Image (cartoon, rainbow, N blue to C red):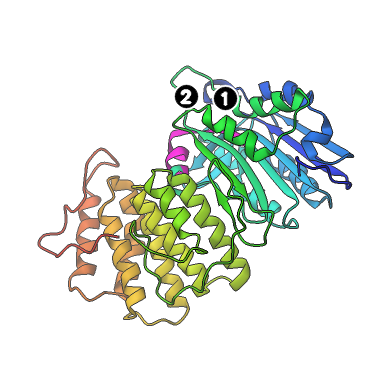
């Protein structure tokens, strides 16, 4: 709750963690003394409160147990997280690094971000506030800029994600320190106002998140400023929705204008986070494989294209095509063909041979089932895959190098 005390007992969970040694990017625990001086009623927004502090924990299962216990509490939950995010290269999943995390042991010593999201999704909407101040490693930062950092709907998420600091520099959790300093002084303005002040202080290259999804049962969010007007449920989605376009005209109640505006302004992480929230809402409301859920999957795929992340865009377009096929839409359905064509085009735009090799077999399998209207598509993928296997893992631009006269697919 944070603003406006609740009569129920609340819980505040403080997690400050970063690896020891050369892998450390942020002095995470330096914020804990300032947070400890904040009145507990402000940290939880309740008169009675339980405070749980985890300083440089080492075991992900222990952290998960604490999160699970806090999430199971019936009253309001406020979760404060500072640390650093890493990307698991095998599964492309984000992890919160713990004290013993190293790049080679990430999958076993880090806390998978989806574990946290999974526990919070089980809570009653409107009872959860998450405040984060984290640094992302270079590869995690690239994924976050395109894919955002979503935790689901029904909660408030405020904070910032910054790229890795310069070499031999250690970042400070200044965003969370600024909030805690204000609270420590006895002031307790609305969290959205505090966030706006912190966001204006920079840095300019940070990804700021301001999601307030507690007032209504449907997603409502923006970056830096939270709109005051209530959001309506999304309008019915057509069977074959068009991808995101910078000139798309939509109804006022549709969230796409906000998402498109963010992407157009270069705030790709914000746009992706909004789309991910609406996809989560569609999944819960209409179910996996529904037309509404596929729509938001396709929106996310096109947002990744706008963010210049062809690998993610390719993956999402293939997922959308497979979801439509699972709905018994035929391979010749224009919506299915369009999704596969866009996945193919984004795969052609991949600069990294290793990622192209990873995605190529999946695209070949899909292309054999959905060859499309232009001849030679399957053969084009196979030829490029053969060429990719003769190239080094990175450093060589292989885009369009295998087309050999095949007409390029329409841009995704």
Residue under numbered circle 2: 165
The answer to whether residue 332 is magenta is no
381 on left or right of 87 = left
Q: CA distance from mark 1 to mark 2?
A: 8 Å
**Viewer-closest of 66 and 263:** 263
Residue 34 visible, this orientation: yes
Which x, y percent locates residue 196? 58, 35
Q: Please tell me which residue is depicted at 11% across the width and 60% down the height of the picture.
A: 404
Magenta range is 132-144
Residue under numbered circle 1: 26
Which x, y percent locates residue 311? 36, 52
Q: Please tell me which residue is depicted at 77% across the width and 32% down the height of the picture.
A: 53
Q: Is residue 283 above or below residue 13?
A: below
Label for residue 131? none
The quarter of the image holding the C terminus is bottom left
Q: Pointer 2: residues within 10 angstroms few (<14), some, or many (20+)?
A: some
């Amino acid at each position: 709750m944070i603003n406006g005390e609740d009569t129920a007992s609340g819980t505040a969970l403080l997690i400050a963690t970063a690896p020891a040694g050369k892998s450390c990017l942020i002095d995470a625990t330096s914020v804990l003394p300032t947070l400890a001086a904040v009145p507990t009623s402000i940290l939880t927004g309740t008169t009675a409160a339980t405070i749980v502090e985890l300083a440089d924990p080492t075991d992900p299962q222990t952290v998960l147990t604490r999160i699970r216990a806090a999430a199971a509490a019936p009253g309001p939950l406020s979760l404060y997280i500072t640390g650093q995010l890493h990307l698991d290269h095998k599964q492309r999943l984000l992890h919160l690094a713990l004290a013993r995390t190293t790049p080679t042991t990430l999958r076993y010593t880090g806390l998978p971000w989806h574990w946290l999201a999974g526990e919070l999704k089980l809570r009653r909407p409107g009872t959860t506030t998450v405040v984060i101040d984290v640094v992302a490693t270079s590869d995690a930062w690239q994924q976050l800029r395109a894919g955002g950092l979503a935790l689901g709907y029904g909660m408030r998420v405020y904070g910032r994600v910054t790229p890795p600091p310069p070499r031999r520099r250690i970042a400070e959790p200044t965003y969370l320190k600024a909030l805690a300093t204000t609270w420590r002084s006895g002031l307790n303005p609305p969290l959205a106002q505090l966030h706006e002040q912190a966001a204006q202080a920079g840095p300019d290259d940070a990804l700021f998140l301001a999601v307030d999804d507690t007032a209504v049962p449907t997603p409502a969010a923006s970056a830096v400023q939270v709109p005051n007007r209530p959001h309506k449920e999304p309008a019915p989605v057509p069977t074959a929705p068009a991808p995101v376009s910078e000139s798309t005209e939509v109804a006022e109640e549709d969230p796409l204008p906000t998402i498109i505006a963010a992407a157009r302004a270069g705030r790709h992480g914000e746009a992706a986070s909004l789309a991910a929230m609406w996809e989560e809402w569609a999944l819960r409301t209409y179910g996996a494989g529904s037309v509404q859920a596929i729509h938001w999957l396709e929106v996310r795929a096109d947002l990744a294209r706008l963010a210049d992340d062809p690998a993610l865009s390719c993956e999402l377009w293939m997922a959308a095509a497979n979801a439509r096929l699972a709905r018994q839409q035929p391979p010749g359905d224009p919506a299915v063909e369009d999704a596969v064509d866009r996945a193919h085009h984004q795969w052609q735009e991949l600069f990294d041979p290793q990622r192209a090799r990873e995605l190529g077999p999946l695209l070949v399998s899909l292309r054999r089932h959905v060859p499309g209207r232009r001849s030679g598509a399957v053969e084009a993928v196979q030829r490029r895959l053969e060429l990719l296997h003769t190239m080094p893992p990175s450093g060589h631009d292989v885009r369009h190098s295998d087309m050999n006269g095949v007409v390029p697919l329409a841009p995704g």
